[in-house]
Amino acid sequence: MERLDKIIATSLQISRKDAITLIKKGRITANNKTIKDPKEKFDENSAELFCDNKRIYYNKYVYIMMNKPKGVISASNGKGEKTVIDILPNDMKRKNLFPAGRLDKDTTGFMLITDDGELTHSILSPKNHIPKTYIAKLDKPFDDEIIKEFEKGIEFKDAKCLPATLEAVGGDYQVAKVVIRQGMYHQIKRMFSHFSINVVELKRIKMGALDLDESLKYGECRYLTKEEISAICDK
């Protein structure tokens, strides 16, 4: 059993505040009865719900895009440190949410937060090679030889990177667009460090075929549509 406002918010991918407004205006019916109390509870899997006479189907999982700011960690429990779950708006919080993958504490950009373990496994599985795109600001420029090394796959003492794409942004060789298809710890920083180049700032701007919504300010987030969820898994 779950509160009606939470069911509506999750199913319609809207804020809890907006869900409460719909309910109080009498626009929601549950089991053929108009319900105006947001706190009333229903079985989310069996209740027949309608909004303005249009059937509502309960979404088992939620998918949230966050523009991650610096200073928060990609974890569900920060053990004293602030996490991406901590900074979610209260009306988006629900049990079992976790970040799908990780960004370093000082890395910003596209963070997917969900409670769908199967999708997360698909995104993170090395065999699927889902591309992730980053913008990196560097302390010195790279050159065409380094681009070729990225394309071949850089080999470390403990591992070898899959081939990656590297290009200059706007002709500036100190601002790099990097596309990787695996998720080694500090991978992009290690790749540039191999050539004695330090990453000054790093931002993820794309997962799969889905771009970060640039209208989101740092720390802001929104629900994804079904089409957007599918795009994350596109290669």
Image: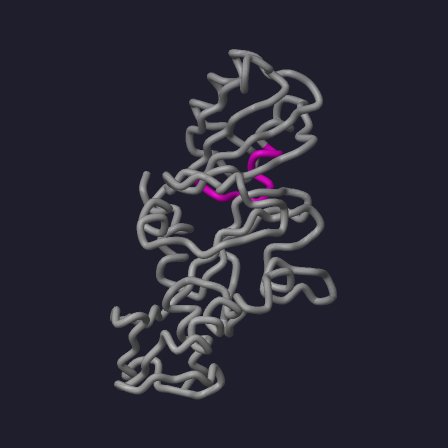
Up-down: is 28 above or below 63?
below
Up-down: is 30 above or below 18?
below
Residue 156 lies in quadrant? top right
Magenta stretch: includes residue 179: no
User: 89 or 204: nearer the eye?
Assistant: 89
Name the residue at 26% across, 69% down. 54
Name the residue at 46% across, 61% down. 114
The magenta segment is 182-190
At which x and y percent is residue 69? 65, 47
Give the quadrant of the N terminus.
bottom left
Give the quadrant of the C terminus.
top left
User: 63 or 14: nearer the eye?
Assistant: 14
**Left or right, residue 43 beside residue 25:** left
Magenta stretch: includes residue 185: yes
Most extreme residue toward the right is 80
At which x and y percent is residue 197? 67, 23
Most extreme residue toward the front is 25
User: 6 or 196: nearer the eye?
Assistant: 6
Name the residue at 60% across, 41% down. 186
Up-down: is 104 above or below 96?
above
Name the residue at 29% across, 74% down. 50
